[in-house]
Amino acid sequence: MTTTADLIAETRRHLRSMSRDQMNKLAATINTTDATLSFTYDLKGVTEGSYLAVGLEIVYVWSVDGPAKTAVVERAQLGSAAAAATTGTIVRVNPLFPDFSIFAALNEELRAYSSPGVGLYRVGIVDLTYDPARSGYDLTGATGLIDVIDVETVGYLPGDQARLRPWRLLRGQDTADFASGFALVLYSGGYPGKTMRVTYKATFAPLAGLGDDVATVAGLHVEAHDIPPLGAAARLVAPREARRSESDAQPESRAAVEVPPGTSRNAAAGFLGLRQTRLAEEAARLRAFYVRVMSGA
């Protein structure tokens, strides 16, 4: 099983290689309203004005008590949400790429994959019951629907199945008649009272927590789990070139020689190239897998 935390770790590996953030651990559990954090180890980099990443939350440090190994903080900073955390949770000190930022970039990636320009999608299935008295069926059970791939019906005998076509998917329907806003119109008959299985293309669902199973929650099959970290790394690296150009940025004197302008942009291009190759491979895989399926009317 691949989790959100696994994708974040893989993205960080792309971004940081063997470099590391300074870290500490929580010495006590916190809830969503606690304003004081207790740490296991000496505070060192945890100083007044620091940002700390605790799971998917970013907090700001108002003050510290070195001997007590505690810090008074402001919760839920930089767009993150306050979250409970258990004893032993890793705390990253002034991280270059907080888990929250990587998490957001991963979900941006998932949203992008279902666009026509990329061509990936999640395959969903919804079962309906054939009624000869109607031709239009609501697709309420189809979440994130993009388009219908195939419609099959089950017959009266074991193994008796047939594909129903032609059919047509109508969008923007009156929700008083079709709650989902989609109507599947059939132009051929099935078996009264029997199941019709609708296979459809769907968007990928966003990840919500560090323990989410990527395949189950997002709907991204395991063979493609290497792609989001590549895209997330590119999304996070690309803006750094703009930061370097800001007049208030004060890089060390060697930066212009050893790390010339354009380095961040070139790094992002490398990640994007790998991402694009893998996206093309996965889109081709989907096309090949569903090559036998014919379009509706």
Image (tube, rainbow, N blue to C red):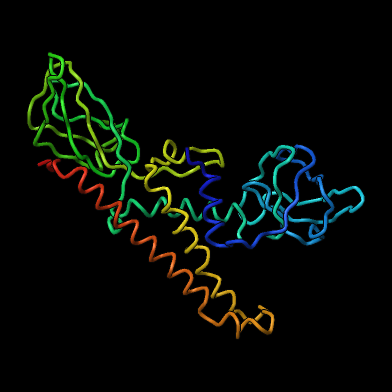
Q: Which percent across, then down, holds residue 263?
A: 52, 77
Q: Is residue 270 left or right of residue 242?
A: left
Q: Quick check: 199 above or below 267? A: above
For this orientation, the residue located farthest to the top is: 157
Q: Which percent across, then down, holds residue 109?
A: 43, 54
Q: Residue at x 39, y 42 (%)?
A: 222
Q: Quick check: 126 above or below 81? A: above
Q: Quick check: 134 above or below 94? A: above
Q: Residue at x 54, y 75 (%)?
A: 241
For this orientation, the residue located farthest to the front is: 18
Q: Which percent across, then down, holds residue 58?
A: 67, 52
Question: How many tags in the picture?
Answer: 0
143 or 157: nearer the viewer = 157
Q: Using the rendered view, name the quadrant where residue 18 is placed.
A: bottom right
Q: Is residue 178 left or right of residue 272?
A: left
57 or 211: nearer the viewer = 211
Q: Examine the rendering and report whether any part of residue 289 can be seen.
A: yes
